[in-house]
Structure formats: structure tokens, C-alpha cells
Amino acid sequence: MDFQRISTGIAGLDLLLQGGFLKGRSYLVTGDSGTGKTVACLQFLRNALKQGEKAVYVTVDERPGEILESAASFSWDFQPDIQEKKLLILDAAPYFSARSGNAGERGIDPQKIVADLGSFAKRMAATLLIIDPISPLILPTDAAGTSQDQARSLMQLIQTQLNTTNLFTAHLAKTVGATEQFLTSGVLVL
């Protein structure tokens, strides 16, 4: 069987992965703070854009401007890609401000997140989705729920509703459980 792959932009990793990530699959990059999860995503993004891919980058802990500054520190300029509508950087903060503002809120709705992401991805014909990090999006929607249920729901919706190759980051601590790892095609631990 011949699988299409997308280069990670990291020569040694591509060698180990027999050419890169499999198109249409989901991957998880984990590690402690400062280990390079975001940098790995940005390097993959940079390489994928050069190969003609289009991407949606969802930032949860940093603002889009901070992501662009991080990239610029490596002399990677994503502004032309944004202007040419090959890259969209989304700030996920609004999903959390509504939740924290009202204790009675149900929490994050995976179906709404995927519907919103799907709308953006389809509008620009995106082939790549990066969520950095995914951990806050997999918190349970109610006290009776579990993060495993939320993770399973969100990741399965992404994989079935979007026609993208997906790269997620997560802190290595307790937020990354067996469910998140099991639902991806591969896990890179930094």
C-alpha cells in the first residue's frame, strides 16, 4: 500500500517516519514546558506551506501575535501565507472566556468547536489542522464527565468531520492520558 506523507520539516524525524506524517491522520506532540512542542508545530507548518498545503493553526495558550513572534525568532515569516489565505491562525480564548464568566456554563462543546473549525477549514480548503495545545479543549463538559470522554469525542469528531492532517500538542503531565494517545496515529514525546 502506498500512503501519502507530509514531511515534518525535520530531516531525521522524516527518516524515522519513512517520509513524514501520513496524510489525513492525527498526531500528538507532548513534552514539558519549553521542550519545543510549538517550535516543532511551526517547523512542520512552515514546511507544509512550502509544499502547497493550507493550514488552520489554533492557539490556546498564546495569542496569534505571539505565535508569529516565535516563528520570527527563527526567521520564519508567516505573514505572506496569511495574506495569501494559505494560513489562518485562530485564537481559542473566546471559548474559555464564556466558560469562565459563568459558573453555570456547560463547558466546551466539542461539536461546536469542530463545526467552527470545519467552517474555517472548508472555506480556505485547509489540509492541515494544528491545535496548540489541545489539553484545555478536552476538559469535561460537566462534573459527571471525564476528560477521556471529552478527548474521545473531540478527536473523533475532528478525524471524521474534517479532511485534514492533524497535529496536536499537550503538556506531558497528567493532562495527556492513554485515550488521547490511543486516538492518534503517533505520539512524539519531547
Image (spheres, rainbow, N blue to C red):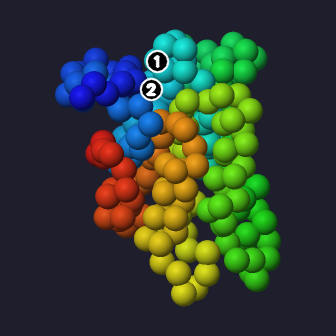
What residue appears at the point 52 percent right and 69 percent down from the top-left corner? 150
Q: Is residue 66 visible?
A: no
User: Which quarter of the rendering shows the C terminus?
Assistant: top left
Q: Residues within 10 Å of mark 1 (few under 14, many from 20)?
A: some
Picture coordinates of residue 168, whole percent (x, y): 46, 45
Q: Secondary structure at mark 1?
A: helix
Tell me, yes or no, whether the two marked residues, 2 and 1, touch with CB atoms within 8 Å.
yes
What residue appears at the point 60 percent right and 24 percent down from the top-left corner? 54
Q: Residue furthest bottom?
A: 144
Task: Report the Cα–Cα distance between label 2 and label 1.
Answer: 5 Å
- What is the count of numbered marks? 2
Residue of label 1? 47
Q: Is residue 153 visible?
A: yes
Residue of label 2? 44
The relative height of residue 156 versus residue 25 in the rendered view (above or below) is below
In-image side of 13 versus 75 (left or right)? left
Q: Quadrant of residue 137?
A: bottom right
Q: Secondary structure at mark 2?
A: helix
In-image side of 48 versus 142 (left or right)? left
